[in-house]
Image (cartoon, coloured by chain):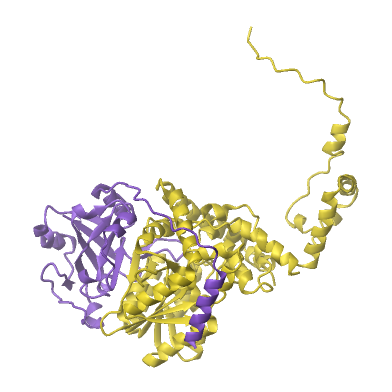
Chain colours: A purple, B yellow
Amino acid sequence: MSTTSRERILAAAKANKPEELPLPIVPDFGGEATIERFTTVLTGIGGTVVRMAGLDELEETLRQLFPEARNTTSPLFRGTVPVNAQTPTGILAEIDLAVLPGEIGVAENGCVWLPEANMLHRALPTITQHLALVLDHRRVVATMHQAYAQLPNTGGYGKFVAGPSKTADIEQSLVIGAHGARSLVVLVY
Amino acid sequence: MNHAIRADKFLLDADRTTWHDETLWFVREKRDRAVYAVPEFQELRELASGIKNHTLSRLDLYLREFEAAAQANGVHVHWAADAAEHNAIILDIIQKEGATRIVKSKSMLTEECHLNPYLIKHGIEVVDTDLGERIIQFRDEAPSHIVLPAIHLKKEDVGDTFHTHLGTNKGENDPQRLTEAARQHLRAKFLAGQVAISGVNFAIAETGAVVVCTNEGNADLGVNLARVHIAAMGIEKIIPRLSDLGVFTRLLARSATGQPVTTYTSHFTKPAAGKEMHIVIVDNGRTQQLGRPDFRASLKCIRCGACMNTCPVYRRSGGHSYDFTVPGPIGAILSPNIDMKKHSSLPFASTLCGSCTDVCPVKIDIHTQLYKWRQVLGEANEIPASKKWSMKFMGRVLASTRVYGLGGQFARKALRLLPHGLTHAPSMNAWAVARELPEAPKQSFREWYAKQPAPAAAQPAQPQIPA
């Protein structure tokens, strides 16, 4: 069934395609690779940026930001719930706060690259009630072109995260906290 | 039934029509603000168009490259020639898994293939998890916009629907509280989902990965909790390289909603350990469209919806008036390829103002294609006889100076002498249904001009120097 469909589709695509056209070269475009720009944009789309002098301030900063978080997990410090790729859904669903290392921040749109290797479990960044991403200020680039140029590959799974989960599906009213994390804070050191 | 008749129904509620019009224009304005903030935006459109044109010109080769890379990643790749095969493949995967509970994120392709009713008929529970899609699923309606599926509804409608289906308080219309109710309801569905179906925004030939863009995070949550992920994509979703996403991710959300980027831009490359990932590659008329030189550029579409938000006809007629999976200007050039007879009125649902073409992030010549479809439909005899004959008649009149002059004289007289009830009879003059005809002048410009004295020989203009 699908072998013949495969052949039919490929043959039709080959027969019907236009004469070959060149693949354009995409320039770098430069841009403003600053933490200030990143902060302005991310704040504008519902995220929060908190500056830390160093990683040693992480746990104290989190205690101040999330005093009520009971179930916490992170590869960076000892949280209350250990999570790995085998953690059952029921336990993941109870996580209040996940603190994960982000790799690259993009100043033009406020997003942060989060590869699978940093997630503990693939569902964790969206199932947690609140998400905190830790970002080295030297890893901020200006544009998506520069972000993709820095990615060695996208691993098995990875994503750019720009702010908290949101929707405007009811009368275009913006509501933060659709299905994924209700808040996103990026902790920059 | 044609577009104009369905639009009439939408227009019965004038307040709602005005609200719909203004809301979509507001989205268009947000798009403009986001676009103007990027100095190289026009260059990005040109690059995106070039990348898509190149990809279409090597489509078979990129599809092969994509398939090989995906298979090397441990992904099962399936090919479906049409909607029926797409649906059968997906049902087969679900049944092999022994699953009955499916969570689904947004996919216009599965809408196009009518997957949901097919699965439900086979005893599968399908839950649309995008909030807008869940709302219209409860109401048993089709999406009226590809990015904002429930844009035809007011919060009171959603409140009523949630009261019926989710037990929210009667009269609860607050978007925040309604969204929270949906979040709680859908969490339970996510946690219980056995198979997750997603659409595909971009498929990267180089890496075999599929990229899915959402704001709600519903694709990520569904896919990463279920054991099996099925991603359904049309053949035109291919892009060559990972780095090409730099161009497309900068264009998509800005064009769609005026956001700098979607909240989640997720790259699904390999299944997690112990899990399965399937990609279903669908033709369903796309290779035929590729073979139409005038219309193949429609395959460059990245489904941002900008052409709908800007379209004066879409904004005032609503998505359902198109009666096609993809409404608006882009739907009006895609639909005749699928069924020329059924969708013959859609290329006429346009003023040909060209605003769609101006905002299209991949530079599809939408209004030119609308015009070309009209020619194709005319030649295929798929336009109403009244339109066909009145066009032929006017063609004759406008081709002859003498006939045009006589016709003008006759019309000016008739307008002055005939009663208003006759000149404005809706059955004879559709133009005057909601408009007044102008007062007929006594003479035409040509008649006036012929009576003027011949102008004196032109004098070279002297500069005016003040004394």
Determine whether B73 is above or below B461 in the image: below
Residue B373 at x, y = what percent? 66, 63
Looking at the picture, tell me which residue is in the foreground, B64 or B316: B64
The residue lying at 27 percent from left, 51 percent from top is A39
Identify the image quadrant of the C terminus of chain B: top right
Which quadrant of the figure has residue B66?
A: bottom left
**Is residue B38 visible to us here?**
yes
The residue lying at 29 percent from left, 52 percent from top is A107
Identify the image quadrant of the N terminus of chain B: bottom right
Side (left or right) of B112 relative to A149: right
The residue lying at 41 percent from left, 47 percent from top is B40
**Is residue B283 visible to us here?**
no
**Total count of labels:** 0
Looking at the picture, tell me which residue is in the foreground, B189 or A30: A30
The residue lying at 30 percent from left, 63 percent from top is A161
Residue A147 at x, y = what percent? 29, 57
Residue that protrudes farthest toward the top in the picture: B467
Determine whether B90 is above or below A82 in the image: below
Determine whether A159 is above or below B446 in the image: below
Residue B157 at x, y = what percent? 51, 70
Residue A187 at x, y = what percent? 19, 58
Side (left or right) of A12 relative to B223: right
Looking at the picture, tell me which residue is in the foreground, B417 or A25: A25
Which quadrant of the figure has residue B277?
A: bottom left
